[in-house]
Amino acid sequence: MELKGKHLVEELEGVRCTIVESGIPASRKAFLSRLLEHNGFEVRVTQDKDKEGHALESWTLGVTDILFNPVIAIYQQKLFTGEGDIVTPAYWQEHFPEAGIPYWQTKSKE
């Protein structure tokens, strides 16, 4: 998922929230929920619906802090992982390097 600088505020579960990401799968929803709750945010999640009102396999995730902007929080290094490391753009996008390989190198194809 790419980081977008646009700040959206919508109502989720009856509460005005900053939309962090929308149209995300359940695995991404779980990852972001854990990360944001660890950093002290109250997370709200709703299942997306099509035009007829049928539930889709995607979710919209927001936080109740309407001043929160994920791009600003990441680049100002205000978010931390469960291990206490600073959240980087790569971590936010779930690009985890393999152990022992620096992030700027790619694993050669064998």
Image (spheres, rainbow, N blue to C red):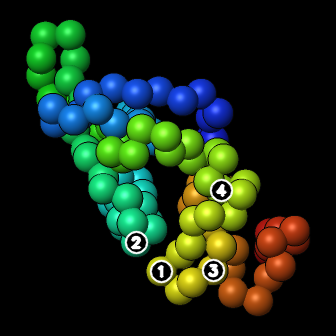
- Kindly indicate whether the residue at mark 2 contacts the one at mark 3 (C-beta within 8 angstroms): no
Q: Is residue 5 above or below residue 62?
A: above
What kind of residue is marked 2?
His
Q: Which residue is mark 1?
A: 82
Q: Which residue is mark 3?
A: 85
The residue at the point 39 percent across, 66 percent down is 40
SS class, disc 1: loop
Residue 110 in the figure: left or right of residue 22: right
- The disc placed on residue 45 is none
Q: Is residue 45 above or below residue 83?
A: above
SS class, disc 3: loop
Cα gap from disc 4 to disc 1, whole angstroms: 15 Å
Q: Quadrant of residue 86?
A: bottom right
Crowd rating for badge 4 (residues with CA inside 10 Å; few <14, some 14–19, many 20+): some
Cα gap from disc 4 to disc 2, whole angstroms: 14 Å
What kind of residue is marked 3?
Asp
- The disc placed on residue 74 is 4
- The disc placed on residue 38 is 2
Of the numbered discs 3 and 2, the one sitting upstream in the chain is: 2
